[in-house]
Image (cartoon, coloured by chain):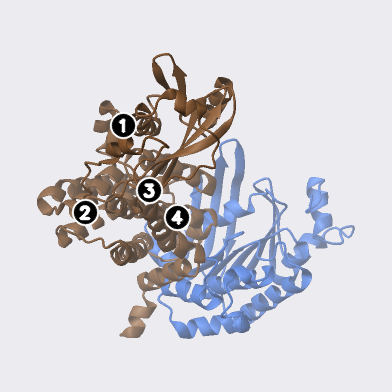
Amino acid sequence: MIDRIRNNQLWQLIRANTLEKIREPGVLFWGIGFPILMSIGLGLAFTRKPESVRHVALISADTGSYSIILKDDKLGNTTFSMERMPWEEAMVQLKRGHVNVAVSIGDSGYRYHFDPMNPDAQLTYVRLSPVLNKIPSTDIIQHPASSIQYPASGIRHPGYEEDLSAVTASEVDVLTVTGTRYIDFLIPGLIAMGVMFSCLWGLGYGIIDTRSKKLLRRMIATPMKRTNYLVAMITVRLIMNVIEAALLVLFAWLAFGITIQGNIPALLVLFLAGNIAFSGIGIFLACHTSKTEIGNAFINVISMPMMILSGIFFSYHNFPDWVIPIIKPLPLTMLADGFRSIFIEGAGFAQTATPSLILTLTGVVFFTIGLKLFKWH
Amino acid sequence: MSPSPVIEVKNVFKSFKTVHAVRGVNLTIYPGQFVALLGPNGAGKTTLVEMIEGIQKPDSGEIRILGKPWKGHEKELRQVIGLSLQETRYIEKLTTFETLRLFGSFFGMGKERVEEVLQLVGLEEKRKAYTVNLSGGQRQRLALGIALINHPRILLLDEPTTGLDPNARREIWEILRSLRASSDTSMILTTHYMEEAEQLCEQIIIIDEGEILKEGTMKDLLGEDSSLKNLDDLFTALTGRRLHD
């Protein structure tokens, strides 16, 4: 009985495919290590209290710099590095992105020069202007060079301690509710991205590679059943994707305390639907070409726009309103949004049934077309 | 009465866009016969063999294997054919044993047959080596092993020794000679090495530009004209070119 299973071609195909994958160290790194590293990098970058330094050009005939420290327990300290320089030099520094705001001093007080489309420059302006408004411009411009130490509480500017302390009376309440941190937003997106890349590369590129080696041609010149080949490829891919996603969730739980707040069966169904969608797309992109370079280009053409638009790293609501209806039906958007709704909003089948169904249908349609056009020889 | 042929090719044509690869070929092969398709690169050897293998379809003409056309009999014909294609690369990180095991499973063959084949093609010591680490000669012996795994009645080898050094080539020849001595497998082999055709095959078919120029045994081919010392001379006499140009 066991021998009969072992001699079975589907079993052997699954086995060969699995061995091929797990013996390639790169596969393990890109599938498992990379998403975890990405969650560490981005998770730490956005969950740590920011100790930010903002460089500001202070228009002046001479040069030199000093700092104004805005101390804040809740938002993190901000150091404004005031760098005196002539106008021309300030423009160069703005272009290079070294400073994002230039301050000049006119008869009516301070003037701020920056690109209003740059949110970071806006933030510098919003945080800096109340500070400067407390300090007469003559003091700012005459202030000696950088060696001055400021005590570490409140805003300190020699002679203005009392006046400036009011600025830091922060009215902020830091949210600690689960699911509102950046990492909570990021992890479901990373899982969706993992499913996409894994299917496009592992399945699509894998098939093209087999065809380019003439191995596909060699295999179908035997009594091998063609469906068995595809079933084996998809099965192995699905198993690997489950392992990859499970390890990422496990890591996110241990490192960042992320939990799944919604319905787990709904999550599994959505995960399966996402795999069907991207497996179908993978088979479709691999259906004809035997050139790996073309496969590479296909995968980039399919994945890059979705990577940018689908809000894996940042919310797609930053895009203009008219683009949103184009972004929402993209398979990666649907999958990432669905995962997020289950992970952080506590959603269940009621919310994810529609995207699950659409993703499944997407997969079936691409799979059917791909199979019709499939070139075995 | 002669036995019924294993392969019949009747007036087969095949073109690709602007190239007429095969132009009106006829041939018949009987059980146990070893036949060489000898011709330079681009003569149409591969196209002809791949049509016999059922991988390509002729534009016109008829091909029968064991008296049956490919259409409607693919499943049973695949069971009795063993073949090797030009330049196949196997799964890199799969061992010799695992690769044979995989192909064996397509024919319902188990471990025992894999062991036999490993011995037959002399790869027992390389059973645990990844295919990517095999030498050119070892890789060709693996390809031959895969072709033989189902005890084929018909063996179709497309340039099995191209690019190999003389030693590695002789190792393949030895395997094929012992196969001829021990079974009634029929074989078609394509080659542009005249020694290979002479050494292995009683029937030699000289092919160029998609047409058969001459066929027969060595004696038939060279016998009539004493100025011809070998097949290369014959090819030059027929075409004005040499086999390796």
Q: Position of residue A354 (x, y in %)?
A: 15, 46
Three-letter amino acid code at the position of disc 2: Thr
Of the pair A48 and B208, the residue shown nearer to us = A48
- Residue toward you, A124 or A306: A124
| Mark with earlier residue (3, 4) | 3
- Residue visible at 52% across and 32% down? A83
Q: CA distance from mark 4 to mark 2?
A: 47 Å
Mark 3 or 1, nearer chain start:
3
Q: Report if the CB atoms under discs 3 and 4 are less than 8 Å apart.
A: no
Identify by letter the chain in brown: A
Residue, x 83% and y 50% (percent of image)?
Answer: B237
Q: Which residue is mark 1?
A: A319
| Separation of residues labelled 1 and 4 (CA atoms) | 36 Å
Residue A334 figure quarter:
top left
Determine whether the residue tagged by mark 1 lies in a helix, strand or loop.
loop
Q: Say left or right for A356 vs A160.
A: left
Q: Give the foreground label among 4 and 2.
A: 2
Q: Where on the picture, by quarter, is residue B135?
A: bottom right
Q: Which residue is mark 4?
A: A207
- To which chain does the residue with label 3 belong? A
Check disc 2 and report its element: helix, strand or loop: loop
Helix, strand or loop at mark 3: loop
Amino acid type, label 1: Phe
Furthest toward the left, the residue is A350
Between disc 1 and disc 4, the foreground one is: 1
Residue under circle 3?
A50
Q: Which residue is mark 2?
A: A176
| Residues indicated by labels 4 and 2 sit on the same polypeptide chain | yes
Pair 3/1: label in front: 3
